[in-house]
Image (cartoon, helix red, strand yellow):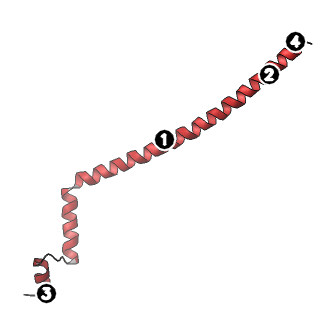
């Protein structure tokens, strides 16, 4: 009996048999690999959408405050001009 055959029978794997075992495990659990890929894409898209919403919301608040200040300034100028 050679040493490789003895090692394989005792639960030790040679490099070739390890890749075969990994291929077999991936083939049996192909659905899990696909599910992990889909969930990864969903998580990344959720983060991108959240970042977009946060930046867009901050930009809208800045515009709203600037327009509000401009409106108040114009309203006070109109009132001051009508009293002269």
Q: Which residue sits at x=49%, y=41%? A: 50
Q: Are marks 3 and 1 in contact (CB under 8 Å)?
A: no
Q: Nearer the viewer, mark 1 or mark 4?
A: 4
Q: Are marks 2 and 1 in contact (CB under 8 Å)?
A: no
Q: Secondary structure at mark 4?
A: helix
| Residue at image mark 1 | 49
Q: Residues within 10 Å of mark 4 (few under 14, many from 20)?
A: few
Quarter of the rendering occupied by the C terminus: top right
Q: Position of residue 70 (x, y in %)?
A: 76, 26
Q: Position of residue 63 (x, y in %)?
A: 67, 32
Q: Which mark is residue 25?
A: none
Mark 2 or mark 4: which comes first in sequence?
A: 2
Mark 3 or mark 1: which comes first in sequence?
A: 3
| Residue at image mark 2 | 74
Q: CA distance from mark 3 to mark 1?
A: 57 Å
Q: Nearer the viewer, mark 2 or mark 1?
A: 2
16 lies above or below 51: below
Q: CA distance from mark 2 to mark 3?
A: 93 Å
Q: Position of residue 46 (x, y in %)?
A: 44, 43
Q: Is residue 51 left or right of residue 3?
A: right
| Residue at image mark 4 | 82
Mark 1 or mark 4: which comes first in sequence?
A: 1
Q: CA distance from mark 1 to mark 4?
A: 49 Å
Quadrant of the rendered structure where residue 16 is? bottom left
Q: Residue furthest left?
A: 1
């Amino acid at each position: 009996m050679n040493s490789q055959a003895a090692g394989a029978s005792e639960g030790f794997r040679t490099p070739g048999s390890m890749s075969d075992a990994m291929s077999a495990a991936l083939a049996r659990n192909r659905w899990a690999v696909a599910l992990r890929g889909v969930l990864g894409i969903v998580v990344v898209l959720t983060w991108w959408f959240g970042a977009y919403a946060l930046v867009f919301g901050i930009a809208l608040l800045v515009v709203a405050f600037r327009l509000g200040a401009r409106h108040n300034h114009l309203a006070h100028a109109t009132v001051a001009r009508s009293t002269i």
